[in-house]
Image (spheres, rainbow, N blue to C red):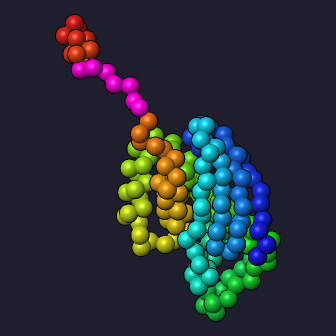
Amino acid sequence: MIPRTGYFDTLIGATSVRVQYAIVDAKNIEASFSYSGKPIEFHLTGWSTRKWLKQYARFHAVYTDSNLYGSSCIQNKTYAVSPDQLTAIFVQITKDVFRYVDQVVRTYPNGILDYCAWYRDTHTNTYDYVTWIQRLACKCILRTKMYDTTIPRETIPLSAITANASSE
């Protein structure tokens, strides 16, 4: 497979980001973007040549446009996909990962890393396409430390809280 590159724009939370992707080979996609002033690179992996037919069948259960994504027959263990269709599949996988990252950021703004660790650890044997994408997105967030918990937070002294409570 010839490496292919491109980009797309998406949202993460309320922030618009441009994702530059590179399809390195049939097993690796690199997606680079900047978030909160920090350059981040997701390495999307998790399938291999021997597992590709199952992953492709799961993908095809969600995305059924055979002109855009090719076709598969899990019973015969065959699939028909052109290089352009394979590129379209990998771009769609990348977009789906980023859609889920956005969903996690919007849903769990104060517990992103906790949620991602929980999801990764509790969804180890469920491999429909959606769960696989969600787990892949959570692993990317955790691996890149996209939400670093060492950011200093403002602390309010207990005396200020108790002083306000007693004056009411």
Query: Does 154 sit left or right of 28 as displayed?
Result: left
Q: Main secondary structure of the magenta part?
A: loop
Q: Residue at x 66, y 52 (%)?
A: 32
Q: Residue at x 76, y 76 (%)?
A: 1
Q: Quadrant of the C terminus?
A: top left
Q: How many marks?
A: 0
Residue 10 in view (yes/no): no
Residue 57 falls in image quadrant:
bottom right
Give the vertical position of 159 relative to 95 (above or below): above
Query: What range of the chain is rendered magenta?
Result: 152-158
Q: Residue at x 56, y 47 (%)?
A: 102
Residue 123 falls in image quadrant:
bottom left
Give the vertical position of 122 relative to 71 (above or below): above
Query: Does 121 sit left or right of 168 as displayed?
Result: right
Residue 27 in view (yes/no): yes
Q: Residue at x 60, y 64 (%)?
A: 44
Q: Residue furthest bottom?
A: 76
Query: Does 26 sit left or right of 118 as displayed?
Result: right
Give the vertical position of 56 relative to 29 (above or below): below
**Residue 45: horizontal and vertical position, in percent?**
58, 68
**Residue 128: horizontal and vertical position, in percent?**
51, 71
Give the vertical position of 96 relative to 105 (above or below): below
